[in-house]
Image (cartoon, rainbow, N blue to C red):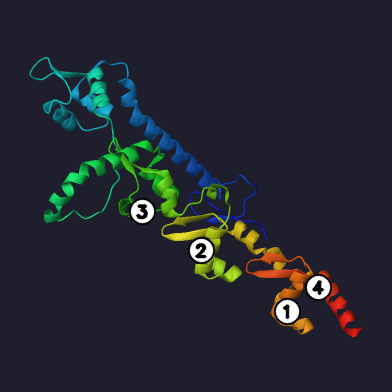
Amino acid sequence: MKKTKKCALCGKEFVPNSGSQKYCSEECAERAKAEKKKRQQDFLRAVEPAFELRNQEYLTFAKAATLMGCSRQYVYKLVDTGKLAASRLSSRMSFIRKADIEKMLAGNPYHRVLPTNLEKPHRSKERARKPSRPKLEQEKQTSVRDEVLDYISGEEVMERYKVKRSWLYASAKRNEVPVCRIGGLNYYSRQHLDELFGLSPDAESVNQWITARDAELLYGMKPSALRSCASRHRIPTKREYGQTFYSKDHLDEYRRTDLAGDDRYYTTEEVAEKYGLTKANVCHIVKVRHIEKVRVGVKNLLPKDAVDRVMAERRNVHEQ
């Protein structure tokens, strides 16, 4: 049976001609190439204004907003509150030095805050908790500031984990995923999202995925047993649109489907039926006579030649 892959663009299953083929057809390959080129162009258009401002020392409010990745109204607010220095040349012209922007940022280090959905304390209890809050907040900010995380944008999250935008926002807030906002866009911690969406570290190397329903039809495993098996034996998993997928190759290796119908092996039930023994007696003989067994899922396979030889020796002993 030839192995199949899932198209990286449309999700359709196909039989690849080579191990490096990612798309089911030339049309999907061309569309993926065009989308990649468009993303690169969008990125260049987004960062081009910032590159043009690198060599300018004096900036208008609009250019300062572009450089800082915020709105012009927010720059006015910073100047009005005295956080950012500006020089007024006339009633309609003002400039901001880039050095003043760097000075403002250096004097206000960024402390990342984890989103939380905890309920607000009651007013009567707020006064009692007030003395201990500064210490707790300081410890929380210190622990958060010390960790180094890898962040990805919301668009990358939706493309990588196959989730909707609304579900991403709700899940990130409910599970306290670290988020930082840069240039009006949200960036999420990749490590926390991998744990949240159940994506294994080695999932990128898997070529074929199956659902829990497919696993039940192929291996006779219930969903609860499949989840336990995947966790215990580190079988790669991933979630797409709320559904969990499992690596078929790793499940085949664990279940040893190539030995399930092999004529060279007995199951414990077959040995008990053939020689008129109970399964407990068979297990005792296998342990005492050191018969090598092969584990296939939850069952043990016993080599026929070794079992027949041991049973023949037992019969000769009883006859004597």
Decide which of tag 1 and tag 3 comes sooner along the chain.
3
Dots 4, 3 in contact, CB < 8 A? no
Decide which of tag 3 and tag 2 comes sooner along the chain.
3
Residue 261 appears anywhere in the view: no
Q: Write down the residue under mark 3.
A: 164
**Amino acid type for the residue under numbered disc 1:** Asn
Which of pointers 1 and 3 indicates the residue nearer the eye?
A: 1
Which of pointers 3 and 2 indicates the residue nearer the eye?
A: 2
**Amino acid type for the residue under numbered disc 3:** Lys
User: Viewer-proximal residue, 207 or 46?
Assistant: 207
Quadrant in which the C terminus appears: bottom right
Q: Picture coordinates of residue 144 (x, y %)? A: 34, 40
Q: Write down the residue under mark 1.
A: 281
Q: Could you tell whether 66 is left or right of 267 in the image? A: left
> Spatial distance from mark 1 to mark 3, Cα to Cα?
56 Å
Q: Write down the residue under mark 2.
A: 227
Decide which of tag 4 and tag 2 comes sooner along the chain.
2
Decide which of tag 1 and tag 4 comes sooner along the chain.
1
> Which residue is depicted at the point 63% across and 47% down?
19
Decide which of tag 4 and tag 3 comes sooner along the chain.
3
Q: Picture coordinates of residue 5 (x, y %)? A: 58, 53
| Residues packed near mark 2 inside 10 Å, few (<14), some (14 to 19) or many (20 plus) | some
Q: Could you tell whether 188 is left or right of 132 in the image? A: right
| Residues packed near mark 3 inside 10 Å, few (<14), some (14 to 19) or many (20 plus) | some
User: Seen from this angle, which residue lies furthest right?
Assistant: 320
> Spatial distance from mark 4 to mark 3, Cα to Cα?
56 Å
- Mark linked to residue 307: 4
User: Viewer-proximal residue, 218 or 297?
Assistant: 297
